[in-house]
Image (cartoon, helix red, strand yellow):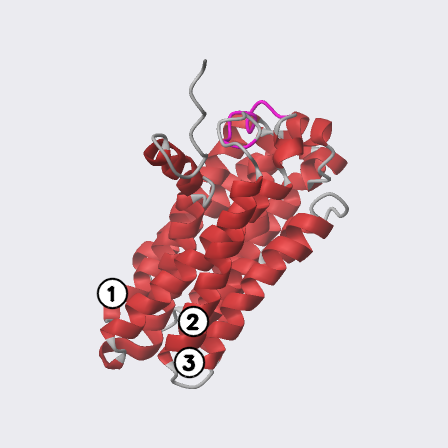
């Protein structure tokens, strides 16, 4: 007689499965969203921003973003199984059984994040956190990603919501800075992920995702990468006017140079450079907000 298999969340395998459940939250992506949100809140509120509110903002944002990412994993598990890059994820690889665990996990985190925001943050923060979930899961994951070449463009608004939630948490009134910071994330998202799509254009094509490079080709997609990178730099410099801009300006110049190189000769090596440099640029731009606190 064989022993009963442990439940996917509880039982002797609980620690292993907890790690897999945490992996579904895309900790790297979630961490970036939380960082941009908290940096924006500090830029708005400064020393007057209560530390407890800042921590609650981070917690609510992490729960909401992590839950939305887990739902993204759940709804894309069958397509993920078709791509070598994603076939090893917990759901398509069969390491997390049943998939319903991911659905419950994702919904639970999203509800917890929204509830925490409603109960502890200004209403604007709760609205933007909720809007971020709605854009990322129903609009982007379920509708746009498999249907439109504009998927990642519109989906980028989910990241902008994290920034706006951060500013709303500061509760200091609205002006140019939060709009420009939200635009920075909005324009950064296509530039970053189109470079990534050039790296994996064959996989996206086979999986049926209409990412711009897999639809029009890398040569025609590269100018759009440059355009969105240029808009990213312009928006961030507009948001940061009056702040120390030396490092941000240098990082922006480097980003534009690697985008021009990709435009001149699209290949995987240059696409990887754009993908990596764009990551560092976003972190640098939002880190600059902290220099004056």
Q: Nearer the viewer, residue 271 or 93?
A: 93
Q: Nearer the viewer, residue 82 or 111?
A: 111
Residue at left 56%, top 46%?
103
Q: CA distance from mark 1 to mark 3?
A: 25 Å
| Rendered position, 172 above or below 166 | below
- Observer able to see residue 243: no
When asked about the image quadrant of residue 79, the answer is top right
| Rendered position, 264 above or below 71 | above
**Secondary structure state at the residue bearing disc 1:** helix
For the C terminus, the image quarter is bottom left
Looking at the image, which residue sits at the far bottom?
173
| Rendered position, 92 above or below 21 | above
Looking at the image, which residue sits at the far top?
1
User: In this figure, which residue is indicated by the disc labeled 1?
Assistant: 291
Q: Position of residue 132 (x, y in %)?
A: 55, 62
Closest to the camera, between mark 2 and mark 1, is 2
Residue at left 74%, top 34%?
208
Q: CA distance from mark 2 to mark 3?
A: 8 Å
Please tell me whether residue 87 belongs to the stretch shown in magenta. yes
Circle 3 Cα neighbour tier, 10 Å, few/some/many (<14 / 14–19 / ≥20)? some
User: In this figure, which residue is indicated by the disc labeled 2?
Assistant: 117
Is residue 241 shown left or right of residue 186? left
For the N terminus, the image quarter is top left
User: In this figure, which residue is indicated by the disc labeled 3?
Assistant: 122
The secondary structure making up most of the magenta span is: loop
Q: Earlier in the sequence, mark 2 or mark 3?
A: 2
């Amino acid at each position: 007689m064989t022993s009963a298999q442990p439940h996917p969340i509880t039982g002797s395998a609980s620690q292993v499965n907890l790690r897999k459940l945490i992996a579904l939250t895309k900790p790297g992506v979630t961490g970036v969203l939380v960082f941009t949100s908290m940096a924006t809140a500090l830029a708005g509120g400064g020393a007057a921003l209560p530390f407890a509110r800042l921590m609650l903002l981070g917690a609510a944002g992490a729960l909401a973003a992590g839950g939305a990412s887990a739902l993204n994993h759940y709804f894309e598990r069958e397509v993920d199984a078709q791509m070598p890059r994603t076939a090893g994820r917990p759901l398509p690889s069969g390491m997390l059984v049943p998939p319903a665990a991911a659905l419950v996990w994702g919904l639970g985190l999203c509800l917890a994040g929204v509830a925490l925001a409603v109960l502890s943050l200004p209403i604007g923060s709760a609205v933007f956190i909720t809007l971020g979930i709605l854009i990322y899961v129903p609009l982007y994951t379920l509708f746009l990603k498999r249907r439109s070449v504009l998927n990642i463009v519109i989906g980028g608004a989910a990241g902008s919501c994290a920034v706006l939630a951060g500013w709303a948490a500061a509760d200091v009134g609205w002006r140019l800075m939060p709009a420009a910071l939200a635009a920075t994330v909005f324009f950064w998202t296509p530039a970053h992920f189109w470079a990534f799509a050039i790296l994996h254009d064959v996989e996206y094509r086979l999986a049926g995702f209409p990412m711009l490079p897999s639809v029009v080709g890398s040569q025609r997609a590269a100018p759009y990468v440059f355009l969105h990178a240029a808009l990213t730099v312009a928006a961030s410099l507009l948001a940061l006017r009056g702040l120390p801009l030396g490092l941000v300006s240098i990082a922006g110049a480097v980003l534009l140079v690697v985008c021009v190189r990709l435009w001149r000769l699209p290949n995987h090596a240059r696409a990887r450079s754009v993908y990596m440099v764009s990551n560092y640029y976003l972190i640098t731009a939002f880190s600059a907000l902290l220099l004056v606190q």
